[in-house]
Every structure is written in structure tokens, then in C-alpha cells.
């Protein structure tokens, strides 16, 4: 029996743009997915006990099987190796929280232990990237990197396929956030493909937005490290606007963003692939965090009240 886990994450700046080589800022959150893997006699049996949005497991089923086969292949094992896999942990299966990457890292680590492969974290991260291809088509690698290493970081994909740029960010203290879920399952692969197609078809509109995303990530980094949270919040609001422009927000996400801002969140934006899934509100104090969380509760929405920069290793 082998065990493993992977962190959930929240993207503060740059989702989607990061796929095309623009830097993004991501923080691991203190919720993780755990996996237990046992060699079996026949086939692949997955017991998924995560709390999920309605329909999440069914929607992701085929991608999940493909992701496991891709990981086994990357580990030079037979992709059809019979396995019993249990998945659970504190990270809910909501789109946008890196649930697929967290589960892939957890499963990769558990396989590593069960088969005594002695893989480094760097290899686990590369293997989880292979799994992410099943879920996102052309992933940037930001989710699996946060799921593997934790921390708060600036991530820039190497478009040539070599080493990505990973820069750890230092903030004075962890910052409270509220993550709100629309309850809608999103197809990350379709969202990523949609952006790539629209970008190609309309460079006059998209090129300036990509430049703006780059500037926002750079300013976001500075503001976070300087502890200028008001500015971080304003930049997040700007980031939400350009995500709307590239067509990845939704009525539900915009509604949650509005609720959070009305309650005093100093910034709010969708997080992750969009098209459903989750948004993140910057609420830097226990009181403000509770206020926003209570508003979500009143609306009957699922949420996570957590912190960025709290997982430091
Ligand atoms: C998903 O959490 C983030 C995306 O940018 C996809 C990726 O970077 O792989 C939408």
C-alpha cells in the first residue's frame, strides 16, 4: 500500500494567460487531496470519496482514467497496471481549486511508494503534468507545481518545454481569502482551447489583453511582497475584467464576485479555468473574511475560508 497527497491551490493572477507564457501567481491552500494505491489483480478500481460539486466525478471520470494511464506510462509502468485507488482528503472537488492536479500528485506519490520507485519531487511534478494533459489539454503546469511544492509563487511556463520559471514570493504574513464555488463543474480543456482559438482568431483584441495580464502579474508580485493589499485587491479586480474579456467568466462567477465586493472584499476575481468553478475574494482580516463567508452561506453557496501564503514549504 502506498500513500500520497497534493495541495489545492488558488490562482491570484494570470490563469489562462499563463498557458501562453505569461507569468501567473498561485498559492497553495491548506486543503489537500490524499490517495492510497494498492497493487491489484484485475483492472483499475477507483474509490473517490472526495466531497465534490454535483456531477464532478462523473464529468471527470474518463479524464481521470486517462490521467492515471498517462502517469503510469511516464513512470515506465504498464498503463494498464491493475490498481485499487482510494482518493479522499480535505480539498473539495470543485472546479478551479486544482483538484485534478492535487489528486494526480497524490496518486503519483502513492504509486511511487507502492512500487518503490524513489522518485524525486521534481519527477512527481513532471508526472503530474503528464496527468494534467488529460484534464486541460495544454496545461501550463501551474496547478501541478503548486500541488507538488506548496507555497506562494510566481510561475512562468517555458514555452520551449524546458525548465519553467518558479519564483517563491515572500509576504509578511498569510492573508485571509474566501473561495466561493458556483457549484458548476467546468471543463478546463474546453476553456483552455476556447481561449487559444479566440486569441488566434482575433489578435487585435487579444494581444493587448495578454500584455495587460503580464503587467498585472508583475504589479501583483510587487504589491504582495510590499504588503500593499489594497493594491493587490485592485489588481485582482482588473484581472477579473480581462478574464471577462477573454470569455472565461460566467453570470454565476460575476454574481459571486459582486457579492464579495459588496461585503467589502478588497478584490475579487474568478480563479482557475472559469466557465463555472470558483472565485476568490481577498479579505485580509478574520472579520472581513467572516462577513464575506456569511454572505455566501446566506445564499446557500459552498465556500472555503482559508489563507494564501500559509503553506510555506
Ligand atoms: C487552471 O487552474 C489554470 C489554467 O490557466 C490552465 C493551466 O494553466 O493549466 C486555466
Image (spheres, helix red, strand yellow):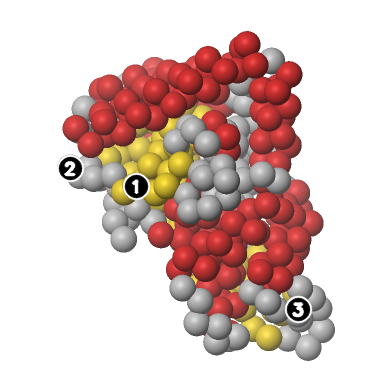
Q: CA distance from mark 3 to mark 1?
A: 35 Å
Q: Viewer-nearest of labels 1 and 2?
A: 1
Mark before the other along the chain sequence, 3 or 1: 3
Tag 3 residue: 78
Q: How far, Cα to Cα, is label 3 from label 2?
A: 47 Å
Q: Is mark 3 within 8 Å of ligand 1?
A: no
- Residue beneath the point at 62% across and 26% down: 248
Q: Residue furthest right?
A: 42
* Residue drawn at x 48%, y 20% as measured from the top left: 211
Report the mark closest to the observer, 3 or 2: 3
Q: CA distance from mark 1 to mark 2?
A: 16 Å
Which residue sits furthest top?
204
Identify residue for label 1: 167
Q: Secondary structure at mark 1?
A: strand
For the C terminus, give its image quadrant.
Answer: bottom left
Residue 210 position in % (x across, y down):
52, 22
Residue 249 visible from this viewpoint: yes
State which tag comes first along the sequence, 3 or 2: 3
Residue identified by numbered label 2: 172
Residue 213 location in percent, x, y? 47, 24
Q: Is mark 2 within 8 Å of ligand 1?
A: no
Examine the rendered structure and indicate whether residue 230 appears above or below residue 171. above
Amino acid at each position: 500500500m502506498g500513500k500520497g497527497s497534493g495541495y489545492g491551490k488558488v490562482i491570484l493572477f494570470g490563469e489562462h494567460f499563463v498557458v501562453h507564457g505569461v507569468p501567473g501567481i498561485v498559492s497553495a491552500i491548506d486543503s489537500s487531496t490524499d490517495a492510497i494505491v494498492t497493487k491489484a489483480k484485475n483492472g483499475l478500481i477507483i474509490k473517490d470519496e472526495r466531497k465534490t460539486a454535483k456531477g464532478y466525478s462523473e464529468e471527470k471520470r474518463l479524464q481521470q482514467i486517462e490521467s492515471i494511464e498517462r502517469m503510469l506510462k511516464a513512470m515506465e509502468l504498464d498503463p494498464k497496471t491493475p490498481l485499487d485507488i482510494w482518493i479522499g482528503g480535505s480539498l473539495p472537488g470543485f472546479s478551479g481549486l486544482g483538484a485534478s492536479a492535487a489528486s494526480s500528485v497524490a496518486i503519483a506519490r502513492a504509486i511511487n511508494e507502492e512500487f518503490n520507485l524513489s522518485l524525486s519531487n521534481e519527477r512527481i511534478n513532471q508526472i503530474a503534468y503528464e496527468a494534467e494533459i488529460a484534464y486541460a489539454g495544454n496545461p501550463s503546469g501551474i496547478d501541478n507545481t503548486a500541488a507538488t511544492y506548496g507555497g506562494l509563487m510566481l510561475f512562468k511556463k517555458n514555452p520551449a518545454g524546458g525548465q519553467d520559471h518558479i519564483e517563491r514570493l515572500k509576504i509578511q504574513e498569510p492573508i485571509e481569502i474566501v473561495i466561493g464555488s458556483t457549484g458548476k463543474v467546468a471543463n478546463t480543456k474546453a476553456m483552455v482551447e476556447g481561449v487559444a482559438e479566440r486569441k488566434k482568431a482575433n489578435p487585435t483584441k487579444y494581444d493587448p489583453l495578454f500584455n495587460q495580464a503580464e503587467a498585472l502579474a508583475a504589479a501583483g508580485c510587487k504589491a504582495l511582497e510590499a504588503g500593499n493589499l489594497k493594491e493587490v485587491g485592485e489588481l485582482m479586480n482588473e484581472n477579473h475584467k480581462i478574464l471577462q474579456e477573454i470569455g472565461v467568466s460566467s453570470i454565476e462567477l460575476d454574481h459571486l464576485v459582486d457579492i464579495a465586493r459588496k461585503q467589502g472584499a478588497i478584490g475579487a476575481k474568478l480563479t482557475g479555468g472559469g466557465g463555472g468553478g470558483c472565485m476568490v475574494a481577498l479579505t485580509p482580516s478574520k472579520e472581513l473574511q467572516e462577513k464575506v463567508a456569511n454572505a455566501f452561506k446566506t445564499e446557500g453557496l459552498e465556500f472555503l475560508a482559508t489563507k494564501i501564503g500559509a503553506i510555506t514549504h
